[in-house]
Amino acid sequence: MSPALLSSLAEAHARGGGGPLPMRSWTAGGEAFGIEAFQAVRNSFAPARIVNGYGPTETVITPLLLKIDPDTPAAAWDGGDWLPIGTPVGARTAYVLDERLQEVGIGVPGELFVGGQGLARGYVGAPGETAARFVPDPFGAPGGRLYRTGDRVVRRADGSLSYLGRLDAQVKVRGFRIEPGEVEAHLLAHPRCREAAVTAVKRSEEAHLVAYVAGRGGEGADSDLAEVLAAHLAERLPAHMRPSLIVVLPALPRLASGKLDRAGLPAPEWKAGADAPPQGATEEALARLWSSVLRVERVGRSDGFFALGGHSLLAAKLVQRIREEMGAHVGLPAFYAAPTLAALAALIDDADEARALQDVDALLAEWEEV
């Protein structure tokens, strides 16, 4: 079954308070198997064997798999966010190639190409797509073919392969190519995050990363989960890889197969101004600029610049407008040090006061010289 369904069963059993169930074997496949979900399955079901199978439909059933039994050392799965997808089965081949279809070394990411027995002949009535996906095998016998999976993988030191994400799932945000799966893996590494999906959403003609998460605390217990996960990512990812918005759901939508239903994810709501209104001249002036640059109707005191869809390019634009329209001087680091409206306004006021004191000191020094 899918890892998502398998881990849900494991969690349900753990909530029931029963001890480990002596299962003989569990086989998972169809999507990436997170390390944390894998550990939950081992703890709840204590299977003698866990099989993580991998294989697109075009490669017919399971060309690669990883088998873990009680004697398998932890090194077989350590060092990644997902369970490795293993090694080829039977008369199959698996190559990790770069964009020029050259083989890459151990530890170097590339695209997975599967060959050997068991490949489909192609797509019915679609010769162009067949030619694009089923390419000549430069490593095998004449006439052989490789299927380009579109999956980004890396070969481990033990020869097994680790899944890194889909090449066609890469998104471009403000000039940076981002692998959503990498952000998802960091979210799932937090003990309070049960499910995660990251996607790019267009807003004001610009792409923004949005994360959808479900927590482990149950209904009403995850009110602060978005803030907790945002702080968690801030310690681990550069600014351009952090989601502009984290949406907390009771559970992520799933297809009947148990796979994530990305089309069923709700449209993000960019909320602002729900808390106390701006106070004082600096906050009010700053709120007007935020509203204009971020294209939101209202901004409250505790609203965060990045939580409202801001990013480094918009921050640079705002820095210029703050200087021109407010006469205040702030740099880009200020938006990370003071991300809320009230905090940034206080920083501006403090800086203005400090400059005023410096000006007074300079004037007194001139008087003393005179």
Image: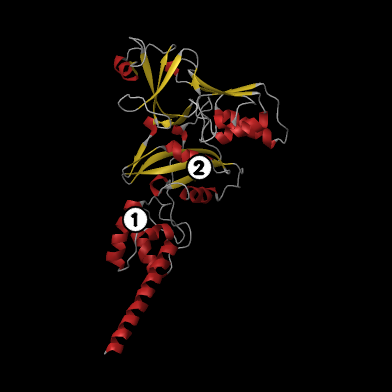
Q: Position of residue 212 (x, y in %)?
A: 48, 41
Q: Quadrant of the C terminus?
A: bottom left
User: Could you say which quadrant of the image residue 107 lies in?
Assistant: top left
Dot 2 corresponds to which residue? 187
Q: Where residue 134 sits in the image (x, y, percent)?
A: 35, 17
Q: Is there any visible trace of residue 338 in the rendered image?
A: no
Point 73% across, 32% down: residue: 19
Query: Which corner quadrant of the image does residue 152 belong to?
Result: top left
Mark 2 secondary-structure assignment: helix
Q: Residue at x 41, y 63 (%)?
A: 344
The residue depicted at 47 percent of the width and 59 percent of the height is 302
The image shows residue 1, relative to residue 248, as above or below, that is above
Q: Which residue is mark 1?
A: 315
Q: Above or below — where is 238 with respect to 52? A: below
- Labels 2, 1: front one: 2
Q: Nearer the viewer, residue 306 or 295?
A: 306
Callout 2 amino acid: Leu
Say if mark 2 contacts mark 1, CB within 8 Å. no
In the displayed structure, 178 sits above or below 45; it is below
Q: Give the percent coordinates (x, y) of residue 114.
A: 41, 19
Specify which label sits upstream in the sequence, 2 or 1. Answer: 2
Query: In the displayed structure, would residue 119 be above or below residue 309?
Result: above
